[in-house]
């Protein structure tokens, strides 16, 4: 047996070269001489015992993993980080306060619940989260999803009551009862979201976010922004319209606003437009001069303070019928158990909110982690968000995730750790406990302006369309389907439709991959597409078929069809041609009573019986012995049916194969063998070989000698054995 000899030298041009001389390997040779499986002496019980064995080292690792704050707080560099975290925390808190009030309107609950949701979850995330820079709390998309569920489960129509005095006046909407019910729905939904996220985290399902591909998320969040803007039109205009939910809710909402647009409150509209323009200008200034400004100009808190002062001084609510926030109770609510009777109708919605919330959080957390050189744990992030939502729900909060705008503020103002987020939440606590009543005259149109301006960045995602058109039509289709489905069907059904479509595109790609015939690059062992490169040439009589996908039930037939089409060698056609040749030879030589030997140019012998003789032989139950035939038998040579004697299947891209795919390949090998075309396989990974062994692929006509580690091994073997293959 020749030994491998490998030499690496540098030529005159300093180009690294390698030369190797070895035998042509096939799978049988590899198994017998090169590779031996390691013997696993440990039993299943031993492995389980090792996995669940408790030690001080494992306990410490588990504690640090569950409470990441223990990894950085003991070594917190006070002199280096504290000042930056204080500045960042105050800046973030100034933004978090008005956003909490505003996003509560999206969640269809009173504004004070937005403040609760801006305190408890942030406090908890400081202990359990792994990201140092994201700002946890209320977020427009999640708030809108919660609001649509709350409106669906507690619509206005359920809370119209007749006046107590029994007069003939029309029914009056009981706002307090409606809001109380919607709070119950939001709290129960948040509890369920927390449970789902926590369980998925324990089960190590942090990878679930990969199914929300970036085009899907961007299309979905753009659609959510459309929903948010539409939902705020009535507050900006000061009109009284019903809030819709479910499919086509966006269209119904626009129709309702346009129908009542003649009743627009001019004072509300003017105040809202002034706030909108002011915030837009401030955001633009912050963006233009972000490198020169030590901290961003806090436009939102300025709007809140000024509009509240104007509303209080001019009595806008009493004199001009401008809708205001209203009563904000002082202090925190005691913990109460959610209304679990509502759970059955909220399961589907809770999964959607849980996945979207985690996806938004982990994508932003990974972005900041990559920028600042640390890592985040997706599973721990699921656990952290789950605990934030679950525990906080007992204190009357609604579901949260990270906010892009606040996270950018927290990071850009120098925030180093979640101490910044903790300080921001303490600012919110101060408002809730001490000065919440100050914001009772705050006009709702000012909050609507805050929401709309904060979402303008989302609409820049429409710029994705021309980029995706140039780069990937399939990803563009995912973006458009996510956007259109979410706008028309609502965020819940739209998200499900988008995920289903994204999965279908994966199936489409595996069913319609690129296939090619490969040729040899002269002077190398490289093989490339003959249709793409001029230098590439095919070997005579050999076709190398490359298919850029695994082989399984969904594409096995397509694989076979592509193989026959690309190689130009179809066994069915060759069989039909052979039969036609035989009939022509029989006619040319007459209807003899003795058998003929039909021989192909490749030396393969086929015995052909005349009709009468065949009947007689079949009646005896066996065919005659070829070697006992008379020397007077006439040998007739058939014309070669195909110039191709070998087909090499390049399985380098294949990562798996199932039983249907394996059966299809074995059938193809049999069909080609019947027409004297040899089929071999090249480029199998070891994991794929294990799957083939499990599927009992190497039985009958298929043997390990037909499998080669590289395409070049397969080519050399096919060239060497082309004359002897199939001889008897």
Image: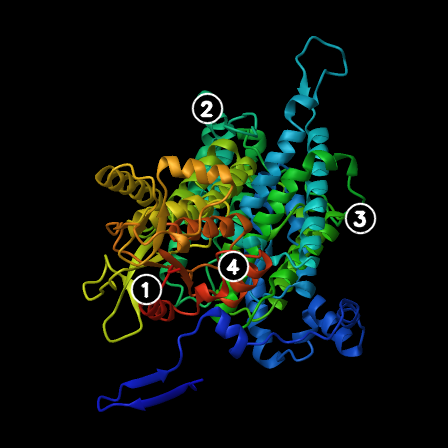
**Residue 441 visible somewhere in the drawing:** no
Of callouts 3 and 1, which one flags the residue occurring earlier in the amino acid sequence?
3
Q: Which residue is mark 3?
A: 335
Q: In the figure, is residue 21 to the left or right of 180?
A: left
Q: Identify the secondary structure beneath mark 2.
A: helix
Of callouts 4 and 1, which one flags the residue occurring earlier in the amino acid sequence?
4
* Distance from Cα at disc 2 to Cα at disc 4: 36 Å
Q: Identify the secondary structure beneath mark 1.
A: loop
Q: Which residue is mark 2?
A: 255
Query: Dot 1 surroundings within 10 Å: few (below 14), some, or many (20 or more)?
Result: some
* Distance from Cα at disc 2 to Cα at disc 3: 41 Å
* Distance from Cα at disc 2 to Cα at disc 1: 75 Å
Q: Identify the secondary structure beneath mark 3.
A: loop
Q: Which residue is mark 1?
A: 722
Q: Residue 477 has which mark?
A: none
Could you say which is closer to the camera, residue 236 or residue 130?
Answer: 130
| Dots 2, 3 in contact, CB < 8 A | no
* Distance from Cα at disc 4 to Cα at disc 1: 59 Å
- Which dot, 4 or 1, sits closer to the camera? 1
| Dots 3, 1 in contact, CB < 8 A | no
Could you say which is closer to the camera, residue 323 or residue 654?
Answer: 654
Q: In the figure, is residue 68 to the left or right of 688?
A: right
The furthest residue to the left: 534
Of callouts 2 and 4, which one flags the residue occurring earlier in the amino acid sequence?
2
Q: Residue 364 has which mark?
A: 4
């Amino acid at each position: 047996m020749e030994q491998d000899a490998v030499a690496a030298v540098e030529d005159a041009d300093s180009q690294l070269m390698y030369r190797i001389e070895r035998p042509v390997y096939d799978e049988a040779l590899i198994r017998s001489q090169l590779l031996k499986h390691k013997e696993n002496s440990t039993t299943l019980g031993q492995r389980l015992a090792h996995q669940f064995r408790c030690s001080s080292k494992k306990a410490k690792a588990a504690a640090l993993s569950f409470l990441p704050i223990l990894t950085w707080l003991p070594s917190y560099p006070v002199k280096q980080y504290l000042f930056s975290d204080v500045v960042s925390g105050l800046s973030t808190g100034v933004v978090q306060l008005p956003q909490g009030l505003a996003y509560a309107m999206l969640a269809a609950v009173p504004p004070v619940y937005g403040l609760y949701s801006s305190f408890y979850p942030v406090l908890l995330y400081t202990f359990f989260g792994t990201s140092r820079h994201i700002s946890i709390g209320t977020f427009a998309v999640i708030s809108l999803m919660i609001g649509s569920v709350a409106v669906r489960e507690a619509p206005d129509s359920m809370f119209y009551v007749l006046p107590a005095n029994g007069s003939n006046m029309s029914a009056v909407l009981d706002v307090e009862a409606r809001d109380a019910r919607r709070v119950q729905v939001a709290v129960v939904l948040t509890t369920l979201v927390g449970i789902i996220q926590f369980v998925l985290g324990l089960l190590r399902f942090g990878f679930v976010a990969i199914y929300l591909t970036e085009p899907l998320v961007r299309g979905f969040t753009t659609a959510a922004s459309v929903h948010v803007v539409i939902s705020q039109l009535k507050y900006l205009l000061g009109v009284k319209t019903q809030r819709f939910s479910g499919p086509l809710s966006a269209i119904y909402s626009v129709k309702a606003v346009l129908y009542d647009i003649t009743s627009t409150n001019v004072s509300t509209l003017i105040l809202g437009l002034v706030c909108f323009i002011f915030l837009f200008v401030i955001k633009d200034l912050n963006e233009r001069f972000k490198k020169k400004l030590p901290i961003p100009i806090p436009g939102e808190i300025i709007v809140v303070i000024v509009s509240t002062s104007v509303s209080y001084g001019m009595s806008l609510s009493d004199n001009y019928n401008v809708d205001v926030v209203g009563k904000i109770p002082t202090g925190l609510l005691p913990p109460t158990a959610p209304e679990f009777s509502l759970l059955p109708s909220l399961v589907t919605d809770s999964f959607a909110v849980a996945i979207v919330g985690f996806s938004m959080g982990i994508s932003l957390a990974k972005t900041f982690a990559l920028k600042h050189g640390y890592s985040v744990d997706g599973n721990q992030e699921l656990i952290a968000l789950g605990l934030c939502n679950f525990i906080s729900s007992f204190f009357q909060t609604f579901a949260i995730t990270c906010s892009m705008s606040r996270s950018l503020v927290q990071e850009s103002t120098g925030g180093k750790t979640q101490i910044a987020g903790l300080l921001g939440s303490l600012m919110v606590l101060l408002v809730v406990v001490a000065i919440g009543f100050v914001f009772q005259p705050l006009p709702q149109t000012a909050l609507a302006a805050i929401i709309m301006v904060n979402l303008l960045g989302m609409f820049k995602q429409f710029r994705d369309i021309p980029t995706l058109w140039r780069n990937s039509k399939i990803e563009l289709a995912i973006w458009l389907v996510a956007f259109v489905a979410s706008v028309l069907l609502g965020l819940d059904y739209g998200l499900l439709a988008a995920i289903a479509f994204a999965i279908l595109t994966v199936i489409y790609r595996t069913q319609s991959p690129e296939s090619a015939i490969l040729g040899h690059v002269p002077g190398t062992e490289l093989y490339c597409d003959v249709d793409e490169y001029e230098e590439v040439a095919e070997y005579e009589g050999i076709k190398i078929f490359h298919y850029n996908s695994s082989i399984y039930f969904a594409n096995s037939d397509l694989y076979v069809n592509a193989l026959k089409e690309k190689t130009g060698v179809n066994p069915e056609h060759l069989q039909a041609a052979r039969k036609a040749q035989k009939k022509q030879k029989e006619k040319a030589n007459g209807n003899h009573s003795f058998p003929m030997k039909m021989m192909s140019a490749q030396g393969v012998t086929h015995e052909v019986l005349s009709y009468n003789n065949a009947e007689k032989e079949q009646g005896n139950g066996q065919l005659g012995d070829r070697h006992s035939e008379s020397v007077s038998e006439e040998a007739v040579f058939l014309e070669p049916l195909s110039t191709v004697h070998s087909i090499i299947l390049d399985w380098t891209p294949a990562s798996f194969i199932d039983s249907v795919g394996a059966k299809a390949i074995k059938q193809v090998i049999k069909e080609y063998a019947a027409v004297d075309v040899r089929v071999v396989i090249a480029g199998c990974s070891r994991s794929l070989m294990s799957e083939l062994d499990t599927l009992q692929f190497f039985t009958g006509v298929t043997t390990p000698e037909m499998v080669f580690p590289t395409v070049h091994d397969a080519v050399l073997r096919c060239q060497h054995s082309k004359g002897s293959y199939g001889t008897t």
